């Protein structure tokens, strides 16, 4: 048995930063990784997918080059092997940087292997037994496989196995009309595949406002992506070399014939093989580790950070989990998960930047609200770039002047949203942002203008 002050399980976004912080405080730390350093973001999530999005964007702009007065002779060809190689190089560099950093940390020992609890303070990794009064679980999540009839008859892809694709599917069927599915759908359409998106709900990304969902659908359909909604009974079959997806329960069901299928229907935490029951750590019905507002589990001395705790599911929420735990443990702060504001982006092109509450949530809260909105066709920066799809929308409390939520679906929306998000964190009224002088020409310069044109929601 080797004793440590702290054990960190997993090297995703929260784990390495926490291990480094604890080690710098002269604690003896062990960090454990069973597979790839860097977790989902580095290996199958943000970094590799956004590298592929960049390649798809380059192909898209090349095809539109004539609109900008640029002549390119002949058809645009995408070499998927080179797209994958570029993605692998970017992802691999990030992964090796994380590994090198951790293995070079003073006061920190890296263990490679599968971690399993033998008790609330004891971990086994291969033949090693480790103990510590403080254990931090940062094991992330993976794609979930829905129980759809006929899946056993076909080969299918998920967000992880898509990273190995170095060819162009003739017709990609994407099951799931939310963030992961839509990013891959547009990406592969721009690479040259035929693409169909199948969604059970009556609209895409149904957690968003209806105007956002409708505009995203328009953007994708304009690029030739087929959208099939209200798919109440999805099932699969094989017909020769083709994959057949049936969408309805009744006779004469709608069907889609394609060459490949991508399942993008949610994720599950990597908690089912850690021996959590041996340590007495509670999980919910979906396997997410139950934590309080400070990310402590029900067992004293054990915390859960990142995707495995079900309190965010994004790289930025995972890193913020680290900041909360480190601030509370080492700085005597009282940071809480409930202090953070919902914020995320959908990286189709143009991207969606979101902050705070949706319009539906605001209406259900009973608050009197005002909303300002402007199409990207009236944003100079978007016009200059030739990227005028989408809109900007900001909603505020009519009485307190607090900013309640915002959506920027348009070029630069993933960056401009932070003007609004930072004002919300500063707890300033919207008038503070309304009176700010922004730089021209930018997307963000229209935010004060929109706040001067508010109407009842």
Image (cartoon, helix red, strand yellow):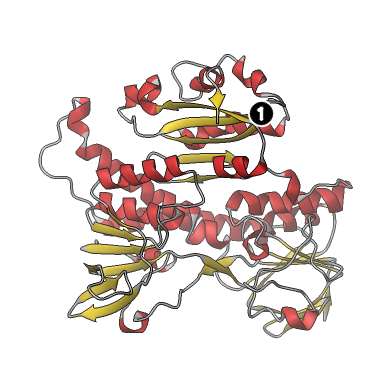
Q: Residue furthest right?
A: 332
- In depth, the one of 54 and 401 nearer the eye is 401
Judged from the image, the secondary structure of the residue bearing numbered disc 1 is: helix
Q: Is residue 137 left or right of residue 42?
A: right
Q: How many numbered marks, from 0 up?
A: 1
Q: Is residue 434 visible?
A: yes
Q: Quadrant of the N terminus?
A: bottom right
Question: Which is more toward the observer, 5 or 394?
Answer: 394
Image quadrant containing the C terminus: top right
Question: Is there any visible trace of residue 166 in the rendered image?
Answer: no
Within the image, what quadrant is residue 312 found in? bottom right
Q: Nearer the viewer, residue 59 or 350?
A: 350
Residue 160 lies, with reference to residue 97, above or below; the image says below
Q: Label 1 neighbourhood size at 10 Å, few (<14), some (14-19), many (20+)?
A: some
Q: Residue at x 49, y 43 (%)?
A: 209
Q: Position of residue 445 (x, y in %)?
A: 50, 20
What's the residue at 75%, 74% (across, down)? 282
Q: Is residue 432 left or right of residue 70?
A: right
Where is 27 relative to 158, above or below?
above
Q: Above or below — where is 82 with respect to 301?
A: above
Image location of residue 80, percent across then percent down: 27, 57
Q: Residue 273 at what x, y percent from top left? A: 64, 80
The image position of residue 216, as x and y in percent, is: 38, 44
- 122 left or right of 57? right
Residue 9 placement: quadrant = bottom right
Residue situated in front as seen by the camera: 27 or 210? 210
Residue at 62%, 61% (x, y): give it: 307
From the image, tell me which residue sits under label 1: 423
């Amino acid at each position: 048995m080797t004793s440590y002050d702290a054990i960190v399980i997993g090297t995703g976004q929260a784990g390495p930063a926490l291990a480094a912080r604890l080690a710098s405080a002269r604690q003896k730390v062990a960090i454990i990784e069973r597979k790839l350093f860097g977790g989902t973001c580095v290996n199958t999530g943000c970094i590799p997918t956004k590298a592929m999005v960049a390649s798809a964007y380059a192909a898209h702009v090349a095809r539109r080059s004539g609109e900008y007065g640029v002549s390119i002779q002949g058809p645009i060809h995408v070499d998927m092997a080179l797209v994958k190689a570029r993605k692998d190089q970017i992802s691999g560099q990030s992964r090796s940087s994380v590994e090198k950093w951790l293995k070079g940390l003073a006061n920190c020992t890296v263990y490679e292997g599968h971690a399993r609890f033998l008790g609330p303070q004891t971990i086994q990794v291969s033949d090693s037994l480790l103990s510590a009064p403080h254990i931090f679980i940062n094991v992330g999540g993976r794609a979930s496989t829905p129980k759809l009839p006929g899946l056993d008859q076909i080969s299918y892809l998920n967000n992880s196995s898509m990273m190995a694709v170095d060819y162009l599917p003739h017709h990609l069927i994407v099951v799931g009309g939310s963030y992961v599915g839509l990013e891959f759908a547009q990406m592969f359409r721009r690479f040259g595949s035929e693409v169909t998106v199948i969604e059970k709900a009556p609209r895409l990304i149904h957690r968003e406002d209806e105007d956002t969902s409708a505009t995203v659908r328009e953007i994708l359909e304009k690029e030739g992506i087929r959208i099939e909604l209200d798919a109440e009974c999805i099932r699969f079959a094989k017909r020769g070399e083709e994959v057949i997806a049936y969408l309805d329960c009744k006779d004469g069901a709608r069907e889609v014939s394609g060459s490949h299928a991508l399942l993008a229907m949610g994720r599950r935490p990597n908690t089912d093989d850690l021996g959590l029951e041996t340590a007495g750590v509670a999980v919910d019905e979906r396997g997410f580790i139950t934590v309080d507002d400070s990310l402590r589990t029900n067992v004293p001395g054990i915390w859960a950070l990142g995707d495995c705790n079900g309190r965010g599911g994004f790289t930025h929420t995972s890193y913020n989990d680290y900041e909360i735990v480190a601030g509370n443990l080492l700085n005597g702060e009282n940071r809480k998960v409930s202090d953070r504001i919902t914020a995320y982006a959908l990286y189709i092109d143009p991207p969606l930047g979101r902050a705070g509450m949706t319009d539906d949530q605001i209406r259900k809260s009973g608050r009197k609200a005002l909303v300002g909105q402007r199409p990207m066709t009236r944003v100079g920066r978007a016009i200059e770039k030739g990227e005028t799809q989408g809109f900007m929308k900001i909603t505020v409390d009519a009485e307190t002047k607090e900013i309640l939520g915002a959506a920027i679906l348009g070029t630069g929306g993933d960056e401009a949203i932070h003007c609004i998000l930072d004002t919300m964190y500063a707890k300033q009224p919207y008038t503070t942002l309304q009176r700010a002088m922004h730089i021209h020409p930018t997307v963000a310069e229209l935010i004060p203008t929109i706040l001067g044109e508010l109407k009842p929601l």
